[in-house]
Image (cartoon, rainbow, N blue to C red):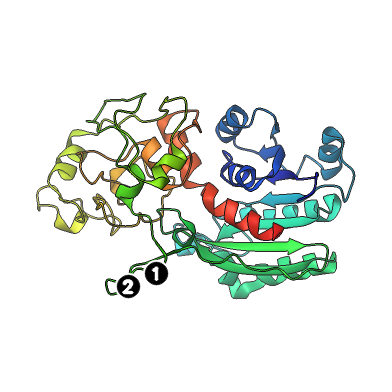
Amino acid sequence: MGQNMDAIDLFCGCGGISLGLQMAGFTIRAGIDIEENYIRTFTHNFVKAKSYCEDLRILTPQKLLSDLGLKKGELKLLVGGPPCQGFSKNVPRSKRNADSENNQLIYTYLKYCEEIYPEFVLIENVAEMRNGFDSQYTATIENYLIMLGYSVFHDVHNAADYGVPQKRRRAFFIARRDGEKIKPPAQTHFEKSNGFDFGNCYINVWDAISDLPSLEQGQEATIYDKEPLNDYQKSLRNTSGVLYNHKARKLQPTQDQRLRSLEPGQGIKDLPNHLRPKGGYSGAYGILTKDMVCPTITRWVFHPGSGRWGHPVDKRIITIREAARLHSYPDSFEFIGSYNDQAGQIGNSVPPLLAKTMAASLLR
């Protein structure tokens, strides 16, 4: 792979992409994000990287290169996931527009590509970004990078296809400067079909979290109380034995009653009339089943009325650590900040195993 495996992560969030890059063999030189609580977690977990809590429209590529002792063209990989609210289906349609300030940050990212001129470029965003607004952003990204001399590949990938126990579709743009053709990553995990298994099956909820201590609302566990039950759990366990962020949130009385009235697989439509809210998401107050692949985790994972976050056995919502397991974060990765901050950090991040797969595809 060569000696230079340096990477810079723009819009780094808490570090999901950076962690995946580390797993693939890259060295994280810097992470930049405007959200202070995200950068606190990034700094805590990437102690050798330089952290910036800054607006990328103000911080210049030249300043960044100078700080890191790099020249234009020397960086191996520039990655980033510009904010996506202008595309996301979780935002009301009336508030989605092509000229959203967040959407314009894609141009900021492309300017960094031009000025830093890395060997490889990796861009991640919501799946809707690839085809949204008549694919104008896809054309912009592709044309800009081709103009700079890169070959470009883009597609939508589902995290579950690469060993993440979560259905999460994301758009990826991969570019390389050497003219070599880009080979998309091969799918490694598959859904069972008519009782037949094709290679590795999708990892389900219970595969991911069943070795973590059982909790009641308000309880916290800081050490393991059972052995890992499968390879996925073994790969994510903290070798020190310490368990971070595994605390069950205490729910409001009405929320608690709603959750206790439901069985795995049920949700808002199954609530008794006296407990049913007037409206809500179709997945609201949903209880996960052991054998399902988790639906897309959002920044609202702290609230039972925002999605299917009910634990399949305990009468509570999943903990931050369980959400992190379902997102493929290892247990050694500690989230910093309030409970809501931590939920946002996970929900807005790229699953590390998915990022690892995308980064590894560059090196083949």
The image shows residue 352, relative to residue 114, as above or below, that is above
Which label lies toward us, 2 or 1?
Answer: 1
The answer to whether any part of residue 110 appears in the image is no
Identified at 78% across, 65% down, the residue is: 145
The location of residue 195, given as percent across then percent down, is 27, 71
Identified at 89% across, 48% down, the residue is: 72
Q: CA distance from mark 2 to mark 1?
A: 8 Å
The C terminus lies in quadrant: bottom right
The quarter of the displayed image where residue 4 is located = top right
Mark 1 nearby-residue class (10 Å; few <14, some 14–19, many ≥20): few
The quarter of the displayed image where residue 69 is located = top right
C-beta proximity under 8 Å, tags 2 and 1: yes
| Residue type, mark 2 in image | Ser
Kind of element beneath mark 1: loop
The quarter of the displayed image where residue 175 is located = bottom right
The image shows residue 31, relative to residue 97, as above or below, that is above
Mark 2 nearby-residue class (10 Å; few <14, some 14–19, many ≥20): few
The location of residue 10, given as percent across then percent down, is 69, 45
Q: Earlier in the sequence, mark 2 or mark 1?
A: 2
| Residue type, mark 1 in image | Phe
Image check: 352 left or right of 218? right
Image check: 117 left or right of 281? right
Q: Which mark is residue 193?
A: 2
The image shows residue 341, relative to residue 111, as above or below, that is above
Q: Looking at this view, is 242 or 220 the one in front?
A: 242
Q: Which mark is residue 198?
A: 1
Kind of element beneath mark 2: loop
